[in-house]
Amino acid sequence: MAENRLQKAIDTLKESGVRITPQRHAVLDYLMNAVIHPTADEIYKALEGKFPNMSVATVYNNLRVLRENGLVRELTYGDSSSRFECNFSDHYHIICESCGKIVDFHYPSLDEVESLAQKVTGFEVSHHRMEVYGTCESCQQQESSRH
């Protein structure tokens, strides 16, 4: 399944005239298989063993190209580093205020918010975004072990 999505993404890039470098392929592959929403630095650290000559700037440039071609979504929450994902299904995020970890969750009935907002305000709604904040289990455990 993920291999098929990766091939489709690569085809999209080729059709746009984007060169598929080994680094670009690796960044895309890593993001498609990531369970977390990694920062550019985390992607760099995960791939530096495979590509010793790759710089953080290369990762940023590849993320920019992938974002511009609609294959990657950049998540900016609060003042922490941007995080990246390839999941374009309708979903929401819950964000840990301690470590910045972001987890996806789905709640279909929130789609009604758009039609209600449109009805009440007369706006033509294009999309909505919702994030929930809290403390993840790991940070809760670290906090309780300190006390």
Image (tube, rainbow, N blue to C red):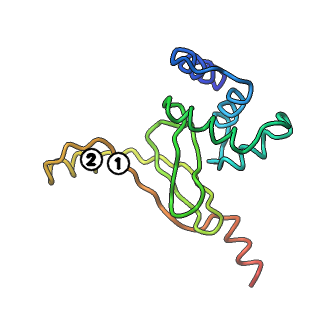
Q: Nearer the viewer, residue 44 or 32?
A: 44
Quarter of the image with the N terminus is top right
| Above or below for 91 versus 70 | below
Q: Is residue 43 left or right of residue 92?
A: right
Residue drawn 48% across and 36% down? 88
Image coords of residue 102 (percent x, y) = 58, 54
Q: Quadrant of the C terminus?
A: bottom right
The answer to whether the residues at label 1 and label 2 have Cβ atoms under 8 Å apart is yes
Mark 1 or mark 2: whose residue is earlier in sequence: 2
User: Is 123 positioned to the left or the right of 15 in the image?
Assistant: left
Disc 2 crowd, CA 10 A, few/some/many (<14, 14-19, 20+): some
Which residue lies under the disc numbered 1?
128
Q: Secondary structure at mark 1?
A: loop
Residue 49 placement (x, y as % from top left): 86, 39
Q: Is residue 126 above or below residue 140?
A: above
Which amino acid, mark 2? Glu
**3D distance between C-alphas at marks 1 and 2:** 7 Å
Q: Residue at x 29, y 41 (%)?
A: 126
Residue ID at (48%, 31%): 70
Secondary structure of the residue carrying tag 2 is: helix
The percent position of residue 12, horizontal first and vertical second, equals 53, 19
Q: Amino acid at mark 1?
A: His
- Viewer-nearest of labels 1 and 2? 1
Q: Rate crowding at label 1 as few (under 14), some (14 to 19) or many (20 or more) other CA atoms within 10 Å.
A: few
Residue at coordinates 50% horizontally, 29% vertically from top-left?
A: 69
Picture quadrant where residue 4 is located: top right
**Circle on res. 29:** none
Mark on residue 114? Answer: 2
Please tell me in which quadrant of the rendered image residue 72 appears. Answer: top right
